[in-house]
Image (tube, grey):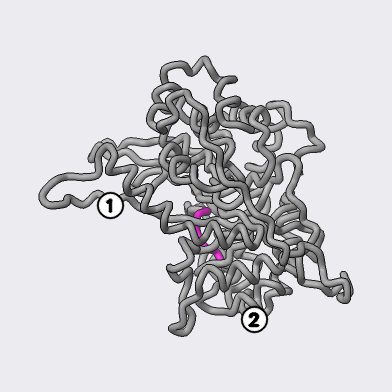
Amino acid sequence: MDRRNFLADGSRLGGTLAALLLMQGCGGGDEPARPGPSPDPGTDPGTDPGTDPGDTVGPRPDVAPDGLAFTMFSRHLQWVSTQAEADTKPFEVGVKLGEKAQEIGYRWVDLTVRSTGHVDPTRVDPAVNLPLMLKGIRSTGARCRHMTCNIVDTTTAANTRNGVPVMAEDILRVANDNGIALYRWGGFSYDVAARDGQAQPFGRQLKQQLDAFAERVVALAALNRRLGMTAVYHTFSGGNNARSVWDLVYMLERFDASELALNFDIGHMVVESPLSAWRTNVRYAMPDIKSVGLKDSLVQRNAGTGAVSSAWTAAGQGMVQWREFFQLLLQGGYTGPAEAQYEYSVTGLNNQSVSLNTTFWSDHAQLASGNLTPAFLTEELRKDLAVYRQAALDAGWPAIRLS
């Protein structure tokens, strides 16, 4: 969908929208056309015709969903095994991941391929472990075409194993050969240090830094084009990272959204703009949104220091207007992952409060003590999914388009 058409539907936003467009240099004129992706004739998404389909670990027919694909972030399922088991038995752990995701209610999995993740390139060779874990996940009927990794650009090592850098292409070629089409990317921060005694950046200095960010990823966009993959930049809140939506869209203007795009995390974006700007941001960024993150949030103020910070909550207990958010996605023509992220705290079985935004392997102290159990976590993770599904239905999404 053309960004200007979707924005026109929201003309009631008036001056706020005009101001945002002016910041982008759009000025109400035609949006410059983006370069289209070039197909790579050497990339065949099919399987080797000489291979038994039951044994293949090559690309799977996990096609892009025509609707909302409710997705489990595998970080929240690390408690199905120990880290050692993930390293040494990737197929078996993949089976556990697929089975548990579906038991909770998720058909789609975003697999962590990063430090401390299910496939940890600092500990194992992704060329060995990633195909096996994907095969295990898919053997259960769960779907996986999405991964989260530490990739920033093509020249910065994503990870280091045994003193040897693991580069973006090392991971992406293996992922592409095994049916992964989407991966999380990013991590740029503004330089806010004073220069020559002068505070910066202000005005055009911000865009100059964004232009430099964009130059860093020209080669990454080209690699994605060759492989037929899409990198999605996760939108965070707080800090000095590029994360205000207008700045990310400005940076992405010179790329095709099939190469570099956004993972629009509504929880973080509502923290940044809880009243109305989040709606404008959804509308403005829609052509660049290829994945969405789901979490709920509040903003709190420390009575003693006056500091303001975010506080994550269970779905439906924070500031996110879930029905309206899903309605905007539907109106904007969005299809793709809707990934649940559990970052709030719960009171466990031993009455101890613990954040779910923790890497829990099965031998973690919280499980060893009995404060958390697989049954407790399974039930807890079901609750948010029920809120998201109902809100999507209330927003007008047909049930057949929710997977």
Q: Which residue is mark 2?
A: 88
> In the image, what residue occupies the spot 38% across and 48% down?
211
Quadrant location of the N terminus in the rendered image? top right
Q: CA distance from mark 1 to mark 2?
A: 41 Å
- The picture places residue 197, in percent across and down from the top left corner, at 10, 49
- The picture places residue 264, in percent across and down from the top left corner, at 54, 42
> In the image, what residue occupies the spot 69% across and 56% down?
39
**First reached walking from the N terminus: tag 1 or tag 2:** 2
- Is 138 left or right of 172, judged from the image as shown? right
> In the image, what residue occupies the spot 46% across and 16% down?
14
Which SS class for mark 1? loop
Relative to 289, residue 12 above or below: above
**Residue 99 in view of the camera:** yes
Of residue 61 and residue 86, the one placed in the foreground of this image is 61
**Residue 377 in view of the camera:** no
> In the image, what residue occupies the spot 69% across and 32% down?
392
- Is 61 left or right of 278, judged from the image as shown? right
Q: Which residue type carries mark 2?
A: Thr
> What is the quadrant of residue 163 in the picture?
bottom left
Of residue 92 and residue 82, the one placed in the foreground of this image is 92
Q: Which residue type carries mark 1?
A: Asp
Q: Which residues are magenta?
A: 356-360
- The picture places residue 335, in percent across and down from the top left corner, at 69, 40
Of residue 125 and residue 262, the one placed in the foreground of this image is 262
229 inside magenta stretch: no
Quadrant location of the C terminus in the rendered image? top right
Which SS class for mark 2? helix
* Numbered mark located on residue 191 in the image: 1
- Is 174 left or right of 49, judged from the image as shown? left
Relative to 310, residue 64 above or below: below
- Dominant secondary structure of the magenta stretch? loop
Does the CB distance between marks 1 and 2 fall below 8 Å? no
